[in-house]
């Protein structure tokens, strides 16, 4: 018998797929574009290649690569075994003399090929940073090993979750939860233990050694760090999960026997609710729009989103009233971004899910055979989103607005610690009014102008002497929250189109995130990085060096936020209108999959013979 026959077959099939070729081409193009944009911005800002350009480019590319490899398991392996279960093909494999490791390693080889090729494609661009300076050979190779380690661990986690799942959306969510737990739980626990010990106790990496993010973070450290120990622990975890998957898959692929009274089972009630809830929902929504009722039946997504929103609001509220340290809001700016990214993944997955399963089960053709129009089907999907997700998302955005305001305030407090240059015209009158938690300084200059500065507000750390102040901070934060809301709407509309045109729910989710969020984010960041300095630089040169720091702190964030908000809104509106028009115009054609049928060629009939001429 051939050694690992499934792996050999899957590798031959995967090597012939167009996606295997295009993934590495796109990865190389993205790396080249990012590197070129980084160099252009560096030259535009500093006028020359600084000594730290290589180090900055290396850090940018490697951290973006880390985010990509950590998400590989979500989109490539989390549904590979569960899809075989749904289609009923995995049972045929175990009717032969194949073992569990044959199937698992075969799927691992096939699904990891695209991710590995994409990483190899950006390898030469990473190596260019060695020639720029600022990066040593040891740092380079350690970072490469850490990225490969994170890729392997992410793929094995996806395989492990897929072995026990049947639903693609639940498998994706469980893989995401496990990866977040592996990446963040260990460092957070070790950080909490160091803070609990007190007395300036140093951070001791214990549980952090199982985190691929921590292993990557210490790969470029100049100080001695347990890099090799952390790499070994990560490999033990990854190979352990791979071994468990191989052992448990032959026992976990069968569909479990269900209870005779399914309506009373706990899992069914958690998914669809009780009998009264299902009856009331059917009476309320079925007559309005059948698609609205079909999409709104499952409630676990809405319950999970409400849980995330309530927990986020509770953490933000407690932090606002208890702590006065700006460090927690600096940390929350990263944690909130991670939670928002998870929300994007959930919305994109849910948006594409209905059409994927409707096409696979034939439900979409049945719906189109009814008096329902294409616009009514699409509108039912949109109303289902509003019904399930509108309130929890608005609740989350309100909490995120407060957290974003406080994060910008923390940045201003940090900037306020930087000494300001002396003012040429000394003040003539200074009046201080101090209350329990606020100090107001009224300064009358020699020109007669009055400047009022408010500092030291408890729980609201804004210092307008070095920063843009409360009003501008609220405007910037409001713009960021508005972008979040429009991004969610654009993800939903484009996710429906991707669900209609894709074969896999995970690939539809990946395409939605890639086209709506990731690629536009790079383009908008580059455009704002070029336009904002072009507008503010002439004013800085005209105003002289004394006004430069205050002008930068006041106008640069505001101009950057205005450009980012305008471009993001234009992008989201464009995706919404384009996807809506496509769904209304091509829903019937895509449901029938007319493009997959090739019409037979039309063979012209031979011309009839001309009648003989009469004599």
Image (spheres, grey):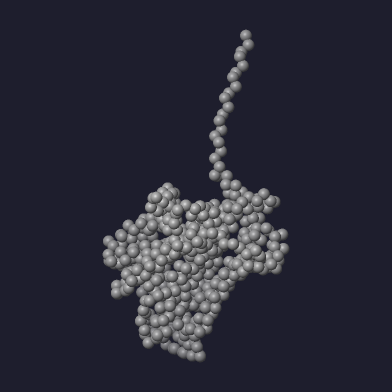
Viewer-closest of 497 and 279: 279
The relative height of residue 239 versus residue 594 in the rendered view (above or below) is below
Residue occupying image coordinates x 42% and y 50%: 9
Residue occupying image coordinates x 54% and y 80%: 317
Viewer-closest of 596 and 523: 596
Q: Position of residue 148 (x, y in %)?
A: 37, 62
Which image quadrant is residue 302 in? bottom right
Q: Position of residue 81 (x, y in %)?
A: 49, 58
Residue 533 can be seen in this image? no
Residue 611 can be seen in this image? yes
Residue occupying image coordinates x 30% and y 64%: 141
Q: Residue furthest top?
A: 615
Viewer-closest of 108 and 98: 98
Which image quadrant is residue 259 in? bottom right
Residue occupying image coordinates x 48% and y 66%: 176
Viewer-closest of 514 and 71: 71
Work out which quarter of the rendered image holds the C terminus and state it. Answer: top right
The relative height of residue 97 versus residue 135 in the rendered view (above or below) is above
Q: Position of residue 475 (x, y in %)?
A: 52, 72
Judged left or right of residue 166, residue 467 is left
């Amino acid at each position: 018998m051939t050694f690992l026959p499934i792996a050999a077959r899957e590798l031959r099939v995967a090597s012939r797929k167009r996606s295997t070729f295009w993934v590495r081409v796109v990865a190389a193009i993205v790396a080249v574009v990012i590197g070129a944009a980084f160099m252009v911005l560096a030259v535009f800002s500093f006028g020359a290649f600084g000594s730290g350009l290589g180090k900055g480019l290396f850090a940018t590319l490697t951290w973006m690569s880390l985010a990509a490899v950590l998400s590989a398991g979500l989109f490539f392996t989390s549904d590979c075994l569960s899809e075989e279960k749904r289609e009923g093909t995995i049972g045929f494999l175990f009717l032969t003399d194949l073992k569990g490791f044959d199937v698992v390693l075969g799927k691992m080889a096939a699904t990891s090929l695209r991710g590995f090729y994409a990483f190899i494609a950006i390898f030469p661009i990473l190596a260019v940073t060695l020639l720029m300076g600022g990066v040593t050979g040891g740092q380079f190779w350690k970072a490469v090993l850490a990225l490969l380690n994170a890729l392997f661990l992410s793929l094995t986690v996806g395989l492990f979750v897929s072995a026990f799942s049947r639903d693609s959306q639940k498998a994706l969510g469980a893989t995401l939860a496990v990866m977040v737990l592996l990446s963040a739980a260990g460092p957070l626990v070790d950080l909490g233990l160091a803070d609990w010990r007190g007395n300036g106790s140093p951070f001791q990496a214990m549980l952090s050694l199982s985190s691929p993010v921590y292993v990557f973070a210490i790969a470029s450290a100049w100080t001695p760090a347990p890099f090799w120990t952390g790499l070994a622990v990560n490999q033990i975890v990854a190979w352990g999960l791979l071994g468990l998957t191989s052992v448990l898959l032959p026992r976990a692929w069968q569909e479990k026997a269900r209870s005779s009274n399914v309506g009373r089972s706990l899992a069914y009630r958690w998914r669809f609710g009780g009998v009264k809830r299902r009856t009331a929902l059917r009476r309320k929504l079925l007559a309005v729009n059948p698609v609205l009722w079909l999409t709104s039946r499952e409630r676990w997504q809405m319950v999970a989103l409400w849980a995330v929103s309530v927990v986020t609001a509770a953490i933000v509220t407690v932090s606002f009233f208890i702590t006065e340290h700006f460090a927690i809001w600096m940390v929350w700016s990263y944690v909130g971004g991670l939670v928002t990214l998870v929300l994007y993944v959930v919305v994109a997955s849910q948006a594409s899910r209905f059409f994927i399963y409707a096409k696979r089960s034939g439900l979409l053709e049945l719906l189109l055979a009814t008096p329902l129009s294409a616009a009514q089907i699409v509108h039912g999907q949109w109303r289902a989103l509003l019904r399930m997700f509108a309130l929890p998302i608005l609740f989350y955005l309100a909490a995120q607005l407060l957290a974003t305001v406080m994060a910008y305030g923390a940045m201003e407090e940090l900037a306020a610690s930087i000494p300001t240059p002396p003012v040429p015209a000394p003040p003539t009158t200074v009046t201080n009014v101090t209350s329990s938690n606020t100090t107001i300084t009224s300064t009358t200059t020699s020109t007669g102008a009055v400047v009022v500065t408010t500092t030291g507000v408890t729980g609201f750390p804004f210092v307008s002497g070095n920063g843009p102040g409360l009003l501008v901070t609220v405007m910037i934060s409001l713009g960021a929250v508005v972008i979040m809301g429009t991004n969610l709407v654009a993800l939903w509309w484009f996710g429906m189109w991707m669900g209609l045109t894709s074969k896999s729910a995970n690939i539809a989710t990946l395409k939605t995130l890639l086209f709506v969020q990731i690629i536009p984010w790079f383009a908008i960041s580059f455009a704002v990085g070029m336009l904002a300095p072009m507008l503010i630089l002439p004013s800085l040169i005209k105003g002289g060096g004394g006004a430069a720091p205050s002008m930068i702190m006041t106008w640069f964030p505001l101009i950057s936020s205005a450009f980012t908000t305008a471009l993001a809104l234009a992008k989201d509106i464009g995706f919404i209108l384009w996807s809506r028009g496509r769904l209304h115009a091509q829903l019937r054609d895509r449901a029938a999959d007319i493009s997959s049928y090739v019409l037979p060629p039309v063979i012209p009939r031979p011309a009839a013979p001309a009648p003989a001429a009469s004599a």
